[in-house]
Image: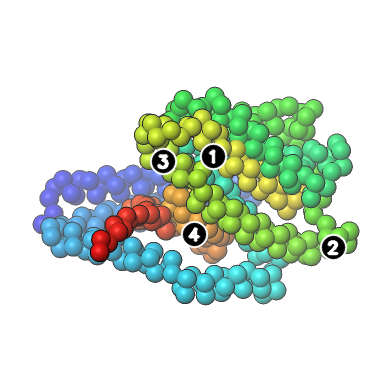
Amino acid sequence: MLRFKDIRQAALIGLWFMFLTFPLLVIKVNTIEQTILWRWSTMAWVGGVSFAASLLARLGRRLLAGRKERRQAEQTVSIWTALGHHLRKRKVYLPLLAAGLLFLLIFPTQFSTYQTTIMTTALIFVMLGLGLNIVVGVAGLLDLGYVAFYAVGAYSYALLHLHFGLGFWTVLPLAGLLGALFGVLLGFPVLRLRGDYLAIVTMGFGEIIRLILENWDEFSHGPRGISNIPRPGFFGMDLTLDQSITFIYYLMILMVAFTIFVVNRLQNSRIGRAWYALREDEIACQAMGIDKTRTKLTAFALGATWAGMAGVFFAAQNTYVNPKSFTFLESAIILCIVVLGGMGSIIGVIIAALVLILLPEYLRVLADYRMLVFGAILVAMMIFRPQGIMATMRRRYTLKRPTVA
């Protein structure tokens, strides 16, 4: 049942996987003895497994072709749709929400300080994902420079404390306002851009901010960064290191809950409906009388506000910031959280952030193969569930005609 074309394509896929995994799985450098170990057998295994998996996948598609395949696809879609409707029922999501909240509250008491720190980082990325979800998921504006607002928040706390002695609680709202200001400054030049051009300009904006922080030594201390950033205090009490880490963790839970509440209210508001209209059809949105300029600037400003406040928590958690923490890779990870979770979905973004941040840490037992497994999981997710973990449900409005007696 397999043709020569299938075998050729499978062979090309095997060679491509061998090429991609060559630096990671074949070359092993011993820095102590200064020797290089070439693991050619591993390369052969990767090529063989990829070739066989590709052949099996093609054979499976042939066997499931036709009506049976379409029926199974429709059944899968209906299962996901039914699951989404089921999770939105109050008697279902309230117990799940209570169980999740209880788990988060007792987490520091059951796990080590290291695990608490990792969970705090995951919660920071939940906050970042929800902020970018406003810009990309709801308004449909592809922003690849979102990490710039994250850097603005982190350096706002570091510099304001260094030069003026301002504390965490004073800088937190100021960082949100500065993030919103930078969001508006980015929004004005890109009002006429959309699609790939918007992505290129925002990516350039993110790189400009990083390069300024790295090269303006008198302002940002350059590549060496700023250290000794204080953690937030609790009514003037002296907290130990473990107590400070736990305190930041609980602050992040409150901040994430506040973010969820505000973002949910925004999505259901008038400006939220304008964002959805802008995402679906910009021309029709403008024709219906919606101010496109104000709608875009509001999306950029509000999305950047949460990034700025998340940056303050990042600086307080690590007590150190430098430009290396705000590369394009961070923007790509946050964008992956939004896409993987589902464009515009709050629950999906939360799940995706926890998966993308925690999974690499808990896959460390796989040593050299952990990122390979992590990448394979993401690829499989995008193939079998391209709309995301929890796709947003379209609202339907029905007009009830009055009954005539």
Q: Is residue 301 visible?
A: yes
Residue placed under numbered mark 3 in the picture: 277
Contact, CB < 8 Å: mark 3 with mark 4?
A: no
Residue placed under numbered mark 2 in the picture: 239
Label 4, label 1: how far apart the Cα atoms are: 20 Å
**Quadrant in which residue 146 is drawn:** top right
Label 1, label 2: how far apart the Cα atoms are: 38 Å
Could you tell me residue 353's position as x and y percent? 53, 55
Drawn side of residue 196 relative to residue 240, left or right: left
Could you tell me residue 245's position as x and y percent? 74, 61
Contact, CB < 8 Å: mark 2 with mark 4?
A: no
Helix, strand or loop under label 1? helix
Residue placed under numbered mark 4 in the picture: 347
Q: Residues within 10 Å of mark 1 (few under 14, many from 20)?
A: many
Q: Nearer the viewer, mark 2 or mark 4?
A: 4
Drawn side of residue 304 relative to residue 43, left or right: right
Residue at point 73% right, 45% down? 173
Image: 223 above or below 101: above
Give the amino acid type for the residue marked by disc 1 in the picture: Ala
Label 3, label 2: how far apart the Cα atoms are: 49 Å
